[in-house]
Image (tube, helix red, strand yellow):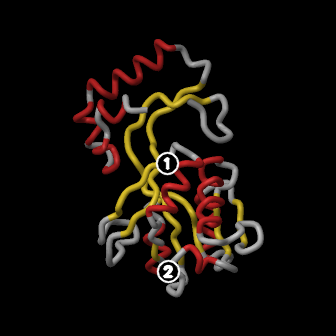
Amino acid sequence: KTFGRQKNVRIMNTGHGLPFAMSVIDPKVQTFKDLKGKRIFVLMTHRDQATAIIVAAKHAGLDYKTDMKILSVRSPREALQGLRTGRGDAFYYGMIPPLAEIKQSKGMHALNMPDDMIAAVKKAEPIWGSLVVKAGRPPLRMDKDFQTLEIACGTAAGLKTSPETVYEATKAIFENLTDWNSVHPLAKQWSLKRATAT
């Protein structure tokens, strides 16, 4: 499989899921419809992420080109800096640890995605999954559960990488899965069953 601009990369397996949400500073914004007129950082060069914002906006009755100001960024770091300096109001991306700092300095929360909005995004771009993020989960530690998208993450290799190398790298992970599960909180999600589900 290949996704987005990384046409010379193939997915080897899926290891964990990363919650992907609309993280917003303004406490008055409680639904996607409330994003009208807001400045939103998005990695638009990633097809899956561009599709998600376009479909979610349309589902909320918004045109992503005219009803909101999409600020295309090349990296999460660029978006985070923009949030710190007040150049944007929201970030549509994975729920990464640095969002905790934005929450502490400016206040930040994630928007709940209704079932039908999630279904529309999944239909347009099947790579997406969904999950309920429990109250108190880092980085935003919301007061209540909310539902959002989830993107599958794992290992990848260049298209020219030999099958033998792909096999040996994959084998090294799954023959040492207990050690692998201990290297990072997200690594605890890795299992052979999940890896072969793609």
Q: Is residue 96 above or below residue 14?
A: below
Residue type at numbered disc 2? Gln
Residue 92 spot, x, y in % from top left? 57, 63
Residue 13's disc is: none
- Mark 1 lies on residue: 128
Report which residue position mark 2 lands on: 30
- Amino acid type, residue under disc 1 in the picture: Trp
Rendered residue at 49%/55% (across/down): 119
Residues tagged 1 and 2 counted as in contact (Cβ below 8 A): no
Looking at the picture, how far across and down is residue 34, in whole percent?
Answer: 59, 80
| Quadrant of the frame with the C terminus | top left
Q: Tell me what residue is drawn at x 72 percent, y 72 percent.
A: 69
Classify mark 1: helix, strand or loop: strand
Element on which disc 2 rests: loop
Neighbourhood count class around disc 1 (C-alpha, 10 Å): few under 14, some 14–19, many 20 upward: many
Say above or below: 96 vs 83: above
Q: Nearer the viewer, residue 48 or 39?
A: 48
Q: Earlier in the sequence, mark 1 or mark 2?
A: 2
Res. 90 image quadrant = bottom right
